[in-house]
Structures are given as C-alpha cells and as structure tokens.
Image (cartoon, rainbow, N blue to C red):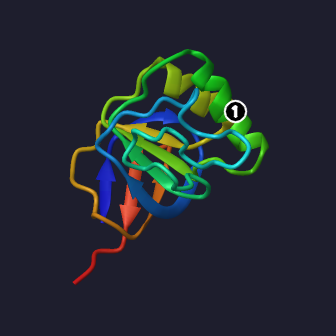
Amino acid sequence: MLIQGRSIAKGTGTGPLLITDTPISFLGGVDPKTGIVIDETHPLFGKSVAGKVLVFPYGKGSTVGSYVLYALAKNHVAPAAIINTECETIIATGAIIAEIPTVDRLKGDLPKDGIVTVDGTSGTVSFAQCG
C-alpha cells in the first residue's frame, strides 16, 4: 500500500514503526548519545528511536531539539524516518540538517505495527498490506 503525504525532508528510510500519540521534545526527552527516550513522563520512555520510523503528532519544546536530531544522526542512533501529523519548524529543521526522511499530513491510515518505507522526496509511505 502507498499513502500520500507532504514531503518535509528528502531521502528514503525503512524501519519498524514506533508510534505515539504524544508530542516529543527532543531536548531533554531523547538522549542524543543513545537514542533512548529519557523523558519519564512520555509513553515511549525507555524505548530507542534508533533505526525506527518514528510516528508522533508534532514536536514540542526548545529549538535546540533540532540540534538533538542532528546529534542523533551523527551518533548513528537517529530514527530511520519521521512521520508527523503536522510537522512544525523544530522537527522540520532537525530532520533536514540530520538528513532524516520526514513526511506529514498523510492521506490514509498507517498500520499499527510492521515495517514501512518513508520516501521524504515524494512524500509517500509504503508498506505491505497484511491479511
């Protein structure tokens, strides 16, 4: 299946879905050295974003969050791709400088789990339909 969205950061990334309906603050919320969510109040606390297709509604917090995304990439623990409901400036800037493929505004539903490919250049998400 193929879902169309809006292109934010170019490139292609494939990985297992890591989904939350809670916004993420990368500054103080994700360890830039390990990729582990360290915000004890976040539903993804203790999980690694490394190599995952990270799905969350939008980012929150400091503009330094963009740099944290860049640091995640430099430390080889960044998400393979990002999917947002509505990507805002902090996440868009971080994804672009870190070269993390990113899309938002999907015109369809994602599976609850599985492996997907995000094409940030075309703004699409593809996955094998189960069942």
Q: Amino acid at mark 1?
A: Tyr
The percent position of residue 82, horizontal first and vertical second, equals 48, 44
Residue drawn at x 49%, y 40% as measured from the top left: 102
The percent position of residue 109, horizontal first and vertical second, equals 22, 54
Q: Pick out the residue farthest to the bottom.
A: 131
Placement of 77 over or under 127, stated as above or below = above
Placement of 50 over or under 27, stated as above or below = below
Quarter-of-image position of residue 111: bottom left
Is 102 left or right of 114, judged from the image as shown? right
Is 99 left or right of 114, judged from the image as shown? right
Classify mark 1: residues with Cα within 10 Å, few (<14), some (14-19) or many (20+): many
Quarter-of-image position of residue 66: top right
Residue drawn at x 53%, y 49% as measured from the top left: 81
Placement of 98 over or under 67, stated as above or below = below
The percent position of residue 76, horizontal first and vertical second, equals 74, 51
- Tell me how many marks there are: 1
Residue situated in front as seen by the camera: 120 or 109:
109
The residue wearing badge 1 is 70
Placement of 92 over or under 89, stated as above or below = below
Task: State which quarter of the image contains the C terminus.
Answer: bottom left
Quarter-of-image position of residue 130: bottom left
Residue situated in front as seen by the camera: 45 or 84:
45
The percent position of residue 14, horizontal first and vertical second, equals 54, 61
